[in-house]
Image (tube, helix red, strand yellow):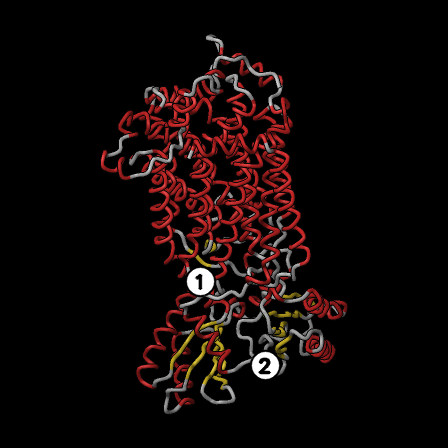
């Protein structure tokens, strides 16, 4: 592979105008496609194999047009001090708003008058209008949302407090500001790392080209493939991260080759042949992690994973072709004056070792202590992970300033916390001899469990399906509400055996519980698949069993530690005020798998780039200890820069007002910190130092069975050295070329 990539690097360097033209043309085509394609709506959210989904499907089949899984809203009214919502003036105002909502949008499915449905609190201070829509929240038009927001403004003028809850006002958070902050910080870090504006700008420009092509392609195909408006966010986040990383690795190696006196084309070829090999395998690990999301069997997640994997593949291709082409355009400006002087200084015997070299030598002197401190430190931080509770946050997790949170609090005060998350019990009486009796028995069983309220069964026109609305006593995301759902399902099993009627529990709260359970069940199989495939891949790269094993175990340690930190902050509330956490609660159920996929890819990037350089030095004759020092001498600065950039990109999301986005940003940033700086920069060299030559051991039969992909460039080096009069044989003795 190294030989092929070496030739590719030289070819793209020579044909840089042609290569740049191809990528610009692809960006233009993707951009035009995105601009002319129909606007994406929302990828249909379904959870195959869950009871809540089966209930939704049954309602859609037996009672079409009810839009059981459509968006919902609650317009909550609170009368002025000393008044009631049932007072004539206030009642007239609310009744008028009901009519206004009914005619405000064609997407409305139903509007419930609070005085007809008894949605008035016992003391008369609070009432709410329930609004159901025919489509999901992501498919609501701006006009529909504006109609909903405008509905209560007139009532507020009369003195009533009006707030709106539910998912109808839920929109995908805009992440542009976070990404801009991340790019700015990335630019600063790159300038500090390279000491050259050109060298710093090159990874940013090429990464943005790759993200532009990937996201534009997703946008262009969104309507055709039902990708939805949310799919591009993951692709953009990951594409930007790996795009900068991969270009950073190639540019860094190119500058190192120039510093050794090689001509520009030769340096580009060697950079792509060596660092490019690491990029290919690092990219493969990211693709495996993202495509592996299909294991969860949630269509939306699968599509997001495949789309992001496509963007990563584009980032790899750009690193192997556009980056060396851009290096050709950059000329001598890719090496600043300070870099030239530093390169010449490194050649002198009295050259001062850099920070990476000094750190590696320290680890070699104290490997046991470094390993113990790293492992025990992460182990202590990981302890809270044992108390991990997963769920989906409700409006109670919103900032107190939002209308959703205020509506949530008003409902809790006026009716009880359970009114924020009613359960919908569906009774399929088709196979029952007496459907009404079966539905009544279900109501009695639910009342016996102990809930806030049970609304009597309502049958469809055919009389074979009944729906019962259940109001729990506790808030939607509480453990007590989850127990109520399980209790109803257990009671339903007895009803079915006695009457033949099937009982299904659904609604947003039940759907969230089923979603969390499905994500929890998929976590271990997903980990096994991703880590197992990556282990085999890294075995090919490093020709070793212990190095990939160490890489996988180190990753698991950093992920569990990151989960522990997330639990401590978002579930227990430690340092919560520092990160803007206003309401503690369960950890978002999607977050652990999401974090595993993203961080695993980035962790393997750092592992491959850092350890491949060690393997390269070892293969070329250095002792195991010296190879560790060499790897850190050339790779520590780049890996540190890459990790700081990723932490900056992810930390930008912590400032979001959305609890879920805040949690994702924090978890990814802290996980990258643990993995890059504790695992890769401390535990990895300590373990390799303790293992010595055993680290690179591979059974002979396995060595013969595994294909030799030559990631470290051993065959390439031999080929270049053996060729008489070749660039490779002579360039090592040349002066730093003047370009």
Q: Position of residue 321 (x, y in %)?
A: 55, 36
Question: In this view of the protein, which residue sits in the foreground, 87 or 600?
Answer: 600
Say if residue 547 shows up in the picture.
Answer: yes
Q: Position of residue 658 (x, y in %)?
A: 58, 53
Quarter of the image with the C terminus is top right
The label number, if any, that marks residue 576 in the structure image: none
Give whichever of 211, 449 is nearer the camera.
211
Image-based side of 247 in relation to 382, left or right: right
**Number of marks in the rendered image:** 2
Tell me: residue 173, above or below residue 133. Answer: above
Q: Nearer the viewer, residue 217 or 105?
A: 217
Residue 650: percent from left, percent from top:
54, 42
Residue 83 falls in image quadrant: bottom right
Q: Are marks 1 and 2 in contact (CB under 8 Å)?
A: no
Q: How far across and how far down the image is residue 681, in percent?
A: 42, 29
Dot 1: what SS? helix
Q: Residues within 10 Å of mark 2 (few under 14, many from 20)?
A: few
Residue appearing at x 34%, y 24% in the figure: 619
Q: Name the front one of labels 1 and 2.
A: 1
Whether residue 725 is situated above or below residue 651 in the rendered picture: above
Left or right, residue 432 beside residue 725: left
The residue shown at (35%, 40%) is 552
Q: CA distance from mark 1 to mark 2?
A: 30 Å
Q: Give the image quarter of residue 78.
A: bottom right
Label placed on residue 515: 1
Quadrant assignment for the N terminus = top left
Q: Is residue 379 at all visible to an observer of this figure?
A: no
Task: Name the residue tied to disc 2.
Answer: 117
Q: Which of the marked residues, 1 or 2, is nearer the chain's N terminus? A: 2
């Amino acid at each position: 592979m190294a030989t092929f990539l070496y030739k590719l690097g030289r070819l793209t360097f020579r044909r840089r105008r042609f290569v740049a033209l191809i990528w610009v043309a692809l960006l233009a085509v993707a951009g035009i496609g995105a601009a002319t394609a129909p606007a994406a709506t929302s990828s249909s959210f379904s959870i195959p194999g869950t009871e809540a989904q089966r209930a939704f499907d049954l309602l859609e089949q037996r009672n079409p047009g009810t839009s059981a899984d459509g968006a919902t809203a609650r317009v909550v009214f609170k009368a002025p001090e000393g008044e009631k919502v049932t007072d004539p003036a206030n009642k007239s105002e609310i009744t008028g708003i009901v009519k206004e909502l009914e005619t405000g949008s064609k997407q409305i499915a139903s509007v419930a008058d609070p005085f007809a449905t008894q949605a008035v609190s016992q003391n008369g201070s609070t009432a709410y209008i329930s609004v159901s829509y025919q489509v999901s929240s992501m498919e609501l038009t701006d006009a529909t949302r504006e109609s909903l927001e405008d509905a209560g403004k007139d009532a507020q003028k009369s003195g009533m407090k009006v707030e709106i809850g539910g998912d109808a006002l839920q929109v995908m958070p805009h992440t542009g500001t976070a990404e801009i902050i991340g790019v700015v910080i990335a630019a600063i870090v790159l300038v500090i790392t390279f000491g050259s504006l050109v060298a710093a700008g090159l990874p940013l420009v090429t990464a943005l080209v790759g993200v532009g092509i990937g996201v534009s392609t997703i946008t262009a195909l969104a309507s055709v493939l039902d990708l939805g408006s949310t799919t591009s966010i993951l692709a953009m986040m990951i594409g930007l991260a790996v795009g900068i990383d991969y270009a950073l690795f190639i540019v860094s190696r190119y500058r190192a080759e120039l510093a050794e006196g090689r001509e520009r084309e030769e340096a580009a070829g060697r950079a792509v042949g060596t660092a490019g090999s690491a990029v290919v395998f690092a990219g493969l690990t990211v693709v495996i992690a993202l495509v592996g999301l299909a294991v969860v069997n949630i269509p939306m997640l699968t599509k997001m994973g495949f789309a992001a994997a496509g963007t990563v593949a584009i980032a790899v291709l750009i690193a192997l072709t556009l980056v060396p082409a851009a290096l050709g355009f950059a000329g001598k400006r890719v090496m600043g004056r300070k870099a030239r002087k530093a390169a010449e200084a490194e050649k002198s015997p009295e050259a001062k070792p850099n920070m990476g070299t000094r750190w590696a030598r320290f680890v070699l002197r104290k490997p046991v202590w470094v390993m113990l401190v790293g492992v025990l430190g992460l182990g202590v931080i990981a302890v809270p992970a044992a108390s991990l509770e997963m769920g989906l946050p409700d409006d109670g997790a919103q900032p107190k300033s939002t209308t959703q949170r205020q509506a949530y609090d008003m409902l809790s005060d006026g009716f009880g916390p359970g009114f924020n998350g009613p359960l919908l019990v569906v009774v399929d009486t088709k196979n029952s001899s007496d459907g009404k009796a079966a539905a009544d028995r279900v109501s009695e069983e639910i009342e016996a469990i102990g809930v806030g309220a049970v609304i009597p069964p309502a049958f469809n026109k055919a009389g074979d399906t009944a729906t019962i609305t259940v109001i729990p006593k506790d808030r939607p995301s509480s453990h007590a509400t989850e127990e109520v759902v399980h209790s109803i399902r257990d009671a339903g099993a007895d009803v079915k055996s006695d009457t033949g009627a099937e009982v299904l529990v659904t609604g947003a709260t039940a759907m969230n519980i089923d979603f969390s359970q499905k994500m929890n069940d998929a976590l271990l199989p997903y980990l096994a698949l991703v880590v197992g495939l990556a282990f085999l891949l890294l075995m090919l790269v490093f020709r070793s069993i212990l190095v990939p094993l160490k890489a996988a175990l180190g990753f698991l340690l950093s992920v569990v530690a990151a989960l522990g930190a997330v639990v401590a902050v978002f579930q227990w509330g430690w340092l919560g005020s520092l990160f803007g956490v206003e309401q503690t609660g369960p950890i978002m159920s999607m977050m652990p798998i999401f974090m595993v996929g993203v961080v695993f890819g980035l962790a393997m990037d750092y592992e491959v780039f850092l350890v491949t350089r060690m393997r390269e030095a070892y293969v070329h004759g250095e002792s195991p200890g010296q190879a560790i020092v060499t790897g850190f001498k050339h790779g520590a600065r780049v890996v540190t820069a890459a990790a700081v950039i990723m932490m900056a990109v992810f930390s930008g999301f912590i400032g979001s007002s959305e609890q879920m986005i805040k949690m994702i940003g924090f978890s990814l940033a802290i996980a990258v910190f643990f993995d890059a700086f504790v695992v890769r920069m401390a535990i990895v060299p300590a373990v390799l130092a303790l293992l010595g030559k055993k680290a690179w051991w591979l059974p002979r039969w396995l060595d013969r069975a595994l294909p030799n992909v030559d990631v470290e460039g051993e065959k390439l080096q031999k080929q270049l050295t053996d060729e008489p009069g070749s660039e490779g044989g002579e360039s090592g003795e040349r002066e730093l070329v003047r370009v």
